[in-house]
Amino acid sequence: MGPQIEIPPRLVRTVYRKASERNQSFEERDDWDNQARKWGVDPEDRHVIGLMGEMAFAIYADLEIDTELVGWSDGGVDFEVSIDGVERTVDVKTSQKEPYVLPVKEWRVESDYYVLGHLEETTVTFLGAATKEMVLDRDRSKSKFGHYNYEVPVTSLNPIPDSESIVG
């Protein structure tokens, strides 16, 4: 098991506020339908889950937390950092269900590095990480929601880098 990060109440409140704002930015688009694109999770809850993972990674790596509203999409990049001296873009994937894979939608392989977190209440446990190459080396699987994901098994993930090796 990787690092466990407890998110303090003040930052949990920030996450909920930002999730509501982010969801509103989706709803304001003419081509978006929250009800049609639930993917098994209430849309606002999905934003909370994702933002909790991002917040936990920022806490873990002592990164400045960007609370500016990212409307519509972050482009598949949550952070731009240096890991062991190598510049990388990072996308944090977070699930409330015990994940067995790191899923990346086939049209969203934008980052250099992916981190998988498991959220339980206000604690995120980081299960591992994968490079873009590791993701693209996997077969695509059709999700039950009709889109395709690359799936890296949790057992194949690299350990998350030591927090000291990540610089914002």
Image: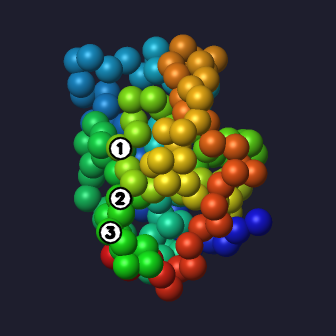
Image location of residue 37, percent across then percent down: 46, 21
Assess disc 1: are there few (<14), some (14-19) or many (≥20) residues with their C-alpha within 10 Å of its C-alpha. Answer: some
Please tell me the numbered disc located at residue 110: 1
Residue at image mark 2? 89
Q: Are marks 1 and 3 in contact (CB under 8 Å)?
A: no
**Residue pictured at 37% horizontal, 79% vertical:** 85
**Residue pictured at 53% horizontal, 80% vertical:** 163
CA–CA distance in space, label 3 to label 2: 7 Å
Q: Could you tell me the amino acid type at mark 2? A: Thr
CA–CA distance in space, label 1 to label 3: 14 Å
| Residue 58 sits in quarter | bottom left
View extreme (bottom): residue? 164
Q: Are marks 3 and 2 in contact (CB under 8 Å)?
A: no
Image location of residue 29, percent across then percent down: 24, 25
Kindly state the secondary structure of the residue where label 2 is placed.
strand
On the question of residue 123 being in view, the answer is no
Assess disc 2: are there few (<14), some (14-19) or many (≥20) residues with their C-alpha within 10 Å of its C-alpha. Answer: some
| Residue 89 sits in quarter | bottom left
CA–CA distance in space, label 1 to label 2: 8 Å
Kindly state the secondary structure of the residue where label 1 is placed.
loop
Image location of residue 79, percent across then percent down: 36, 61
Q: Could you tell me the amino acid type at mark 1? A: Glu
Q: Could you tell me the amino acid type at mark 3? A: Glu
**Residue pictured at 46% horizontal, 15% vertical:** 36
Q: Does 28 appear above or below 91? A: above
Residue at image mark 3? 87
Q: Does 22 appear above or below 80? A: above
